[in-house]
Every structure is written in structure tokens, then in C-alpha cells.
Image: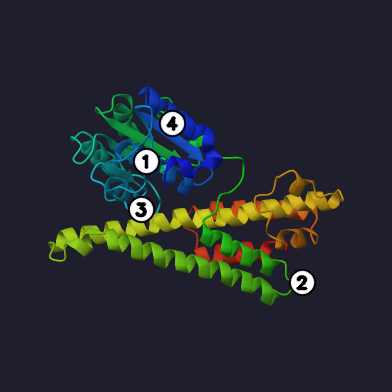
């Protein structure tokens, strides 16, 4: 994706492009927003723009990528030699000091393919204290021609020393949730099923099965993608000790990425239930103000209003609290299936 593909975030993107125009790009950024996927996409667009072979220009200044050249394709597929990603890689979803040290070592090497080196820390709020402290000096005095980008949906969890060394840009958009096509299609079927007039335990378990099946497919996809990128696939004859290390790292990476994306899918339900709650406000006021004023995230979903007509404002608000609790549970080592079952059965639909 290129900067032009983010019309909802035009203001923040324009700030980045103005910095590029003036040759005053910051050495360290903190991107904040509602979804890590969006933040990753923006960070990837910036990395592509910095290393693009056929960039879009304003006058002489580079302001966007072509999204087609070999360099852009490499960045898009996470195999560019000068673009490095750090993610939480343990079951407790933390970024360890060893990962930060490896990143700093990479940044201190000269670029191998392009002019700039780019480092992206996904879920920077998951930096352990010692890892965050190890990153401080690099944030303050980065190697020449390098850019560090920290991504988080929870900036309040970052150390003040980290915050003070980064230029912060918000990509929260207009308060609406941006969904991928698969998420939109799934949410449509979920809302239609939730709006079914038959209020039985069987229907509720069908909703549960819909969500659990989605998560199962999600984990299988993540396993397939990360396994394909693992050095285990490229070096079949590696030493047993090294292969065992790679296997452990792969398992941790799969678990961390699954937890991250699972939180996004629960977030999709939260945004839909927010729409339901807003609609209950409209129903009690005999008014459709939420829809008319553009407050709904998914105004195209017909099931939302049908569910809202059956609920009170208090029940709509209670649903949001149930999902907030589920997110907190899933951030721990709670049994996933039980936590999801209890939560979905408690929803008022």
C-alpha cells in the first residue's frame, strides 16, 4: 500500500509527506491508533517510500512510493534487507532485550540495498523495561540514514522516556473501525445471525461456533505464513541445536501473532456492539440520530438495528463491558475456549 491508500488518515499522512518534502523526516516516530494492522500498513508505506526505486514526487521531493517496483515488493513481503521488524515473540507477548540488541546491531550496519534503514517495533507497549531502556540511546542518537517507527494501540503503557524521544502521529481516523474484506464479510454474517428472531440457546451456540471457527482459521493461516518465512524452510540441513532454536522462535512468533490478531477480531465485535449500543440510544429516543449523524461504524449492517430494538441502553452498554472483560482475560494465560464461551453466552442479543 502507498500513502494515497489512506484517505481516512490524510492529516497524519500529509504531515509525513511535508517532512519528506522539506527533508526533515524525524529519526524516530510513534504511530498510535485503534488497530495495529493499520499502523503496520502505514509504517510499511513509509518504508516503501524511503526506499522506492520509482517514487512519486512533488517537485524534486519524494512523497510516496510506486508500490510496484522490486524494492516496494520486498518491503511489502517483509524480505527487504534494510527494513527490520520486531514483534512480541513469547507466549506472554513481550519484546525481549535480546530482540532489541539484535535490532540495534542491524541498524548500525550500512544499508545493503537502499539509502535508508528502517526499523519497525510492532506493539511497542510490550517492550520489557530493560528492552525499552536498551532502545533509548538509539532513539536519541540513531545511526545515519535510519528511521525507527514504534507502533502501539496503548501509548499510555510506554515509558515516558520512550515517548519523549519519538514524534507521535495518531492514525485513529474519524473514530471508525477499518476492516479488511474478510472481517467485513464475517461481521455481516455474524450480525445477521445475531438478529435472528429465534432467541434460543442453539442460536447462541451457533454464534459461538462462528467466532471460534474464525479464530481456528486465523491461527492456521498464521502458522502457514510464518512457517513459510522461517529459516527452517530454507535450511533443511541446519545443525540440530540451531534448528531447535528456530522451532522455538517459530512457535513463539506464531503464538504472539495469533494473540495480536485475535485481539483485533474481538475488537471487531466490540465496534459492532458499540453500534448496537448507539442504536439503542436512538431507539429509546424514538430517533435514528446515530445513523443520520454518521456515528455508526457499520451503517450498512441491517442486523444492528434489529438487535438494538430488543435491548435497553443498559443492556447495550453491558455488552461492551463483557467484551472489554474478554480482552483482559485473553491478555492473560486464561483458557481461550472457556473465556470466549462464557463471554458470548453473557451477551444480550
Q: How crowded is mark 4: few (under 14 residues within 10 Å), some or many (20 or more)?
A: some
For image coordinates 16% across by 60% down, the residue present is 241
Q: Is mark 1 on a helix, strand or loop?
A: loop
For image coordinates 34% across by 50% down, the residue present is 76
3D distance between C-alphas at marks 2 and 1: 50 Å
**Any mark on residue 348, and which?**
none
**Any mark on residue 197, and which?**
2
Of the two numbered discs 2 and 4 on the same chain, state the one appearing first in sequence.
Answer: 4
The nearer-to-camera label among 1 and 4 is 1
Of the two numbered discs 3 and 1 on the same chain, state the one appearing first in sequence.
Answer: 1
Q: In this view, does 313 lie to the left or right of 33?
A: right
Residue to which mark 4 is pinned: 16
Q: What element carries label 3?
A: loop
3D distance between C-alphas at marks 1 and 4: 13 Å
Residue to which mark 1 is pinned: 65
Given contact means CB atoms under 8 Å apart, are the residues at marks 1 and 4 in contact? no
Does the image show residue 125?
Answer: no
The image position of residue 208, as x and y in percent, is 60, 69
In the rendered image, the residue lying farthest to the front is 59
3D distance between C-alphas at marks 2 and 4: 49 Å
3D distance between C-alphas at marks 3 and 1: 34 Å
The nearer-to-camera label among 3 and 1 is 1
Does the image show residue 208?
Answer: yes
- Above or below residue 229? Residue 130 is above
Of the two numbered discs 2 and 1 on the same chain, state the one appearing first in sequence.
Answer: 1
- Above or below residue 190? Residue 84 is above
Q: Nearer the viewer, residue 340 or 168?
A: 168
Amino acid at each position: 500500500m502507498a500513502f494515497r491508500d489512506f484517505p481516512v488518515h490524510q492529516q497524519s499522512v500529509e504531515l509525513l509527506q511535508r517532512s519528506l518534502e522539506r527533508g526533515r523526516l524525524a529519526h524516530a516516530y510513534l504511530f498510535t491508533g485503534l488497530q495495529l494492522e493499520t499502523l503496520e500498513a502505514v509504517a510499511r508505506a513509509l518504508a516503501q517510500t524511503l526506499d522506492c526505486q520509482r517514487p512519486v514526487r512533488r517537485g524534486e521531493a519524494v512523497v510516496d512510493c510506486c508500490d510496484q517496483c522490486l524494492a516496494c515488493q520486498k518491503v511489502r513481503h517483509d524480505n527487504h534487507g534494510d527494513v527490520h521488524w520486531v514483534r512480541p515473540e513469547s507466549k506472554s507477548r513481550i519484546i525481549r532485550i535480546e530482540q532489541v540488541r539484535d535490532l540495534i546491531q542491524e541498524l548500525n550496519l550500512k544499508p545493503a540495498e537502499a539509502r535508508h534503514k528502517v526499523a519497525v517495533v510492532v506493539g511497542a507497549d510490550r517492550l520489557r523495561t530493560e528492552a525499552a531502556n536498551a532502545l533509548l540511546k538509539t532513539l536519541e542518537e540513531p545511526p545515519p540514514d535510519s528511521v525507527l517507527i514504534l507502533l502501539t494501540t496503548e501509548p499510555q503503557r510506554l515509558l515516558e522516556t520512550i515517548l519523549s524521544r519519538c514524534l507521535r502521529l495518531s492514525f485513529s481516523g474519524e473514530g471508525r473501525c477499518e476492516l479488511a474484506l474478510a472481517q467485513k464479510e464475517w461481521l455481516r454474517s455474524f450480525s445477521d445471525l445475531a438478529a435472528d428472531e429465534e432467541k434460543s440457546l442453539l442460536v447462541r451456540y451457533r454464534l459461538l461456533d462462528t467466532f471460534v471457527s474464525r479464530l481456528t482459521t486465523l491461527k492456521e493461516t498464521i502458522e502457514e505464513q510464518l512457517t513459510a518465512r522461517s529459516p527452517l524452510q530454507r535450511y533443511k540441513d541446519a545443525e540440530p541445536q540451531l534448528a531447535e532454536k528456530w522451532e522455538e522462535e517459530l512457535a513463539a512468533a506464531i503464538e504472539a501473532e495469533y494473540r495480536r490478531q485475535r485481539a483485533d477480531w474481538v475488537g471487531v465485535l466490540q465496534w459492532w456492539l458499540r453500534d448496537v449500543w448507539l442504536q439503542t440510544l436512538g431507539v429509546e429516543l424514538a430517533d435514528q440520530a446515530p445513523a443520520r449523524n454518521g456515528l455508526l461504524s457499520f451503517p450498512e449492517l441491517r442486523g444492528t438495528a434489529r438487535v438494538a430494538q430488543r435491548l435497553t441502553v443498559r443492556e447495550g452498554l453491558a455488552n461492551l463491558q463483557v467484551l472489554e472483560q474478554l480482552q483482559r482475560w485473553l491478555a492473560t494465560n486464561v483458557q481461550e475456549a472457556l473465556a470466549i464461551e462464557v463471554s458470548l453466552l453473557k451477551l444480550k442479543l
